[in-house]
Image (cartoon, grey):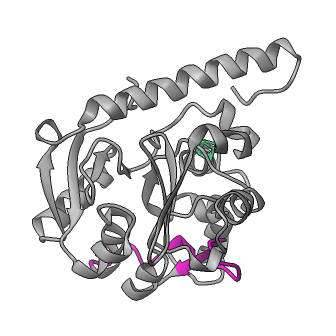
Amino acid sequence: MVLGTYKEIVSARSTDREIQKLAQDGGIVTGLLAYALDEKIIEGAVVAGPGEEFWKPQPMVAMTSDELKAAAGTKYTFSPNVMMLKKAVRQYGIEKLGTVAIPCQTMGIRKTQTYPFGVRFLADKIKLLVGIYCMENFPYTSLQTFICEKLGISMELVEKMDIGKGKFWVYTQDDVLTLPLKETHGYEQAGCKICKDYVAELADVSTGSVGSPDGWSTVITRTDAGDSIFKQAVEAGIFETKPIEEVKPGLGLLEKLAAQKKEKAEKNIAARKEMGLPTPF
Ligand code: SF4
């Protein structure tokens, strides 16, 4: 299955106005982790918090909804959240941990749970793993290059970044600037070229904007725990949902992009093998 194993797919958004304003799309990551914190399903969550430089995230352990809100919004450069999981358990003493991860991080986390060599103290503490869709990611210096040099604005003026409709979007207070993705592809992390997972297939719950209208997210529940926590949150009024069959552009687009990513990665993996280069698959 091109979207991995799942239980249900819906279009959803947070009902919290503040989260709607702060979040990238439907506010699912912030809303779900905040709900899990409030309901004591988790005691803390590792998220991509603000760093010392604009738009360069720093992993942080959020213990409150306000800390989660401070970390809301997508950053297009890597946040090494996996590294912080150990600290969350060892230094913060968290027994029930939540986190958000891109697909490659999700794979790493599941591997540590499957083969917990050296991390037994961590493996069973992860109670909610929220995965986000990811087509590519950029080193911070690359982001600076195409935002500051190609688009001519400084990082501190950027209010939001997004990828969609074949473009990289940069929003400032008074402007919306775009770059065609063909101009940004060359700046991607090298590993992204052989990555086959677009939709965080190993998460408890995966989410991203693709498939849903603006301001909404497409939510895929995958595990018993993820499905149950998301449904409890919907029941509690944290999210409003619509059947995915009733929204546009709908599931077809998500399936198409997930399939394209796999095909592209297969081609690049074959090319690397032919050159005698290592591949992870
Ligand atoms: S494309 Fe894959 S390897 Fe690259 S950042 Fe996203 S999940 Fe990780």
Quarter of the image that includes the N terminus: top left
Quarter of the image that includes the C terminus: top right
**Is 231 above or below relative to 30?**
above
- Residues shaded magenta: 39-61
Q: Residue 91, located in which quarter of the rendered image?
A: bottom right
- In-front residue for pair 131/53: 53
- In-front residue for pair 110/17: 17
In the image, farthest residue toward the right: 276
Task: Count how many numbered circles sit on residues in the image.
Answer: 0
Is residue 53 visible in the rendered structure shown here?
Answer: yes
* Residue 178 percent coordinates (x, y): 52, 54
* Residue 264 percent coordinates (x, y): 59, 23
Residue 44 located within the stretch drawn in magenta: yes
- In-front residue for pair 219/186: 186
* Residue 141 percent coordinates (x, y): 77, 61
Residue in the picture at 48% in, 40% down = 166
Q: Residue 104, located in which quarter of the rendered image?
A: top right
Residue in the picture at 22% in, 77% down = 16
Is residue 50 visible in the rendered structure shown here?
Answer: no
In the image, farthest residue toward the top: 274
**Is 253 above or below relative to 19?**
above
Quarter of the render that holds ligand 1: top right
Q: Residue 114, located in which quarter of the rendered image?
A: top right
Q: Is residue 266 left or right of residue 227?
A: right
Residue in the picture at 55% in, 19% down = 263
Residue in the picture at 36% in, 29% down = 255
Residue 35 located within the stretch drawn in magenta: no
**Is 74 above or below relative to 103?**
below
